[in-house]
Image: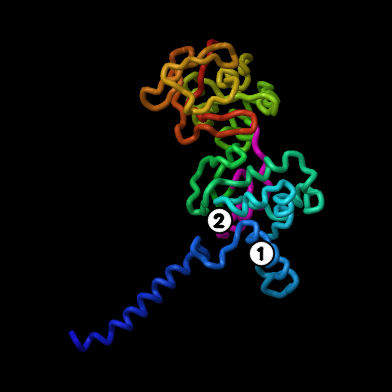
Amino acid sequence: MKKFTYLIPILCILLLASCQEENNVVPQTAQDPDLKSIEQTLIDLSDEAEAEELKDDANSRRWGKRPKFRTLITALVKTRLIKTVAINRLTVLAPTDAAFAELGLNPRNIGSVPNLKEILLYHVLEGKIRSTDLTEGYAHTVNGASVRVSLDGGVFFNDAEVILADKWAINGIIHGIDKVLLPPTLVDIVQGNENFSILEEALIKADLVDVLADPMAEFTVFAPTNDAFAALLGELGLTKDQLLGLPNLDQVLLYHVLGGSVFSDNLADGLSVEMANGENITFDLTGAPAIIDVNGRSTTLNTGLLDIKATNGVVHVLNGVLLPTL
């Protein structure tokens, strides 16, 4: 054994190098001593982008312009949220200057935007959330409204794509996005999701879009998916066009609408409530959460898609369609 003892220091060096190489797979971590606050990180990213533009060398032209965040920084200052993002543990979905420019906004006029603070808070999630931590579905923002997360062909929040992911700060993470997110109404949640395309068509046909988009009203919507509508069409022997042509289509849809915001933790087994069409539904929580309609049919709630918060209410996704008395 003695003749092999000289190998021990070499093995230790190799193991140390291997560990360092593995750690380098992640560009930044929460333990990085060079990390700064979210505010300062946004400033530094913008400074680096401008310095790169000044170089105007072949390398910068090859890889394109780096994103800048001057308009966002100014907006945070104007709304006095700059200290909030500097000291709290947050994930910031940061629209680039180009994203704001698409809306005609820049550091000079961003302060004139109505409800700017609420819009900015819609770009903030609590805690440190890496792109690899995200799952398909909805996430609650600090604003209170939900933002849709899609991982199909990239990372998207609503229709905004992440173009700069996982930029660590000492108190959070920044994801640069290519569009400004606007807090959604109930209609926006339906229109922004391809799984609700039939429901969207039905709302348009029944002339209920403006009702559910009313910012002064508040509703709970039980939203059937396309698959739910497809199952109903098969059950009733109808085509989609026949369904959309029903003279009482508005009553079918209003049977999925409840006045006020009712969250899942407010539901109770046996609870009966009157819907907007005047008829009742009853909640059955003895197994998988379900709704019993006036015809005694049971429709389950999608437990992974409850409490999707809009600016004027809340959405719960249904795996079936409720039928009123027709």
The residue indicated by pointer 1 is 44
User: What segment is highlighted magenta in the picture?
Assistant: 157-185
Q: Residue at x 68, y 61 (%)?
A: 43
Along the line of sight, the residue nearer the viewer: 85 or 134: 85
Label 2 environment density (alpha carbons within 10 Å; few <14, some 14–19, many ≥20):
many
Q: Is residue 322 magenta-colored?
A: no
Classify mark 2: helix, strand or loop.
loop
- Kindly identify the amino acid type of the residue bearing the numbered disc 1: Asp
Number of numbered discs = 2
The figure's colour scheme reads rainbow
Q: Which mark is residue 297?
A: none
Q: Earlier in the sequence, mark 1 or mark 2?
A: 1
Asked whether residue 1 appears in the rendered view, the answer is: yes
Q: What element carries label 1?
A: helix
Residue 41 image point, x, y percent? 63, 61
Disc marking residue 171: 2
Q: In this view, does 120 lie above or below 325?
A: below
Q: How crowded is mark 1: few (under 14 residues within 10 Å), some or many (20 or more)?
A: some
Q: Residue furthest right?
A: 108
Give the vertical position of 184 relative to 47 (above or below).
above
Q: In which quarter of the image is the C terminus?
A: top right
Question: Would you identify the image quadrant in which residue 113 lies?
Answer: top right
The reply to whether residue 98 is in sight is no
Viewer-side residue, 145 vs 191: 145
